Amino acid sequence: MSGVLRRAAFQLPVVLTLIFLVPVLPLSHPSPGGTTGPFRAAVFTPTTEGNTYWPEVHRVMRAAAESLEMDIEFHEFDVGDRFEKVEEGVRILQTDPIPDAAIFSVAFGQAKPLMEVAEAQAIPYFLNGPLFPEEMEELGGAPRREYDRWIGYFHEDEEEKGHLLARELIAAARSANRTAPDGTVLVVGIGGDATWYGSRLRESGLRRAVSEDPAARLLQTVPTRWTPAEGREMTRRLLARYPEATVVWAASDQLALGAAEALRAAGMEPGVDAFTGGLDLSLVGLQAVREGRLTATVAATPLIWADILVCLRDHLAGNEGADRCEGIFLFPPVIATPSTAADYVRLAEQFDALDYTRATPVTDRLREMDRREIKP
Amino acid sequence: MKRLAVRHFLVVVAVVILVSAGTLFYQIRMQYSQGTRDLKDILEMVEESYLPAVAAGVFFFDDQQLQLLAEGILLHPYVESVVILEHRPGENVPLITVGDDSAGNGELHTYPLVYRYEGVSREIGALHVTVSLDEIREQTLAQIRVATVANLLKILAFALIILLVEQRMVFRHLRAISAFMGSLDPEHPAERELVLKRGIGRNTGGSDELSEIAGALNIMVRRLEGVLNEKKVLLQELYHRTGNMMQSIRAILKLQSLRTEANETVETILRNVDNRILAMALVHQKLYQSENLSRVDMREYLQELAREVLRSYALPDRPVDLELNIEDARLLIDTAIPCGMVLSELLSNSLQHAFPRGRGGTLGIALHRTGDGQYELTVSDNGIGPGAEFEFPRDSSIGLQTVQTIVEKQLRGSLVLDQTRGVRWSIRFSDDIYQERVSNE
């Protein structure tokens, strides 16, 4: 599927969600059969200083849990201390009240110890990636092969995210005629934490976009640990090294916002003299796109996390069709540009009001998704 | 001997200092060479190991890594400062500076930072490493100071030990040999044997140089005593025979005088000749009888000579007394014989002229040391004296002229005549104008 077609296809469910779900009042859902009290789900996610992505994910999941009459607890761990996450996660999974289910969003080397504890405690769980291929192979390559309680593995199409954003930024620069004298659009990239495989995939997308465009050239990328301050500082230094660069590709909305500040500080107007964008589809990112500070923000909608929670609920309750959630899921991204950002903002503002007991368009799509898109 | 020991001590100290200084210089040179080799290795290591990481750090703006790398380089010896620079359009911007780069006496090494990105090598900055051999120099100087003091102490201790050992093993024995040689009895040199107080086993079976010297000295001394004894015997025999020959001459003269008709002049001449031979014969007799073959006991000699001269004049009608006042003195044979000749002449002169016509009197003979180390022989009589018109040496007889010649030529002394009361001859002479025939020292 080409990138253009994907973009159109993935924007459609969002619009449908806005049309069909927002007016509907929350419906009562059947109680989980044979259980006493609501299901408890534990969610392990990373965080960074000033992070804007994960709070929105938590907000969506909290809304979904409330809608699904589930209890949910979030455990955030700083990406700077991966060991703390494992140790604390193990302790939580072994301490009463033991959660009924879990979702692990992990970095390199963190999955296996958490999964082993979950297996020992008979806790079903989802794993959020992407994981390095070697690590994935060590875990059996797919759910249910070596770990019985491992329901599903899901992640966004990070490579495609990086690719979409790069294409959008290069096109914007070319449209504004912000090119080198030879017509080449000069690109610098601010990547994320290189210990997370998703960062590498995002940069791969950037490189693919540049390689596809003969009039674009990638000058350099630099890794960061996601903070806006790093985005600002790295942009400043990259611009000092490559003052002719007009595209600053950023691996997250936070980094992109820092880059926009640095552009301004360098006397360049974002969206006019130079172009930057992020990869989170976060509210602040969407607002910045609307204001013209960012050219685009690209990611899958946070509703995918609500869908995973629905899957968990069905699995715990033994509902019919629960097996549809088992396996590997790759969520393609959507791109928010100044022309579409307002729609995504409106959607995000409705997250708390959605009825997650009904199948959402995203959830429906899970049933139809070609699971072979991920090659473990 | 002390001078030899000190000289030896100084030679040992000088040699050890020279050797130590040479060794120290060699060690310092090796250390300095090692330092420069280490420095070269460090610079090569920086170039090979640090440069790629620094280039990557600069390329990716990894200041934390750059700081660690720069501090890592600075930890190496001799590195004074590290500066990491980034090339930017139109300028080189220092990113990291560690160490003291203001010292100014270091040696700057510049390495270009090249990073290969997207298949293209880019020179993105430079690494400045300032190194200094000051540390080596300071270390070397400190070691020189310590080594010099330590070596000096060691050398002094070593030399003192050597000195003490040599003092005990060599120099005290040399002093013992010297003392032994100095204390040899000239007449009986082999009376004592040289025995060195050596360690156990050295006195008996040892045959080192000192033992050989001691043995050789003992042999030499024994041979010397044998030679001395032989010479003493020969000399005594010579004196004996000389004395006998003179007595034989006197006997011949006596027989001749008896066969001669009474003639006073001839008798006087013969008596004078006899007395002169007597003076010489007596000396040889005394020497023959003496243990000392060079010196004559003057008291015995002069007393016996005076009595013999007095007896030769056979003066039963003239009572002449003899007054002797002779100090205990032992004079060399070459001094004693002239003294005896002078005494014989002066006594003969007094006996012939001082007491005429049956007049009696006293002859005085005295010998004593004067304050200036000389001897004074006094021969006097209380006779009639030579008379007012007599003037010495103008009116001297052949006998007195002989006396004067002997005193002045053989004794190299002086002769004074006092004729206030009789006659008083004073002869001053020294006993050190001749050497001993046989050494008694």
Image: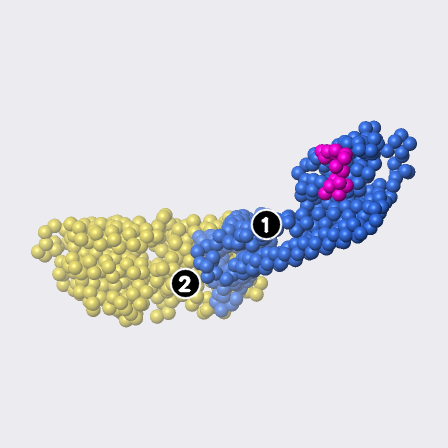
Chain colours: A yellow, B blue
Residue A7: name its quadrant.
bottom left
* Residue lying at 35% horizontally and 60% vertically, measured from the top left: A196
Q: Viewer-nearest of labels 2 and 1?
A: 1
Amino acid type, label 2: Glu
Q: Chain of mark 2?
A: A
Q: Is residue B116 visible?
A: yes
**Is A338 covered by the magenta stretch?**
no
| Residue denoted by label 1 | B185
Left or right for B146, reference A142: right
Amino acid type, label 1: Asp
* Residue lying at 56% horizontally and 51% vertically, measured from the top left: B180
Local SS, label 2: helix
Q: Chain of mark 1?
A: B
Q: Position of residue B365 (x, y in %)?
A: 73, 36
Q: Quadrant of the N terminus of chain A?
A: bottom left
The one nearer the camera, A222 or A313, is: A222
Q: Position of residue B219 (x, y in %)?
A: 56, 60
The magenta segment is: B308-323
Q: Position of residue B238 (x, y in %)?
A: 69, 56
Q: In this picture, is B276 found above or below A223?
A: above
Q: Is residue A53 visible?
A: no
User: Dot 1 surroundings within 10 Å: few (below 14), some, or many (20 or more)?
Assistant: some
Q: Quadrant of the C terminus of chain A?
A: bottom left
* Residue lying at 67% horizontally and 47% vertically, measured from the top left: B286
| Residue denoted by label 2 | A203
User: Dot 2 surroundings within 10 Å: few (below 14), some, or many (20 or more)?
Assistant: many
Q: In this picture, is B330 found above or below A109?
A: above
Q: Position of residue A211 (x, y in %)?
A: 46, 69
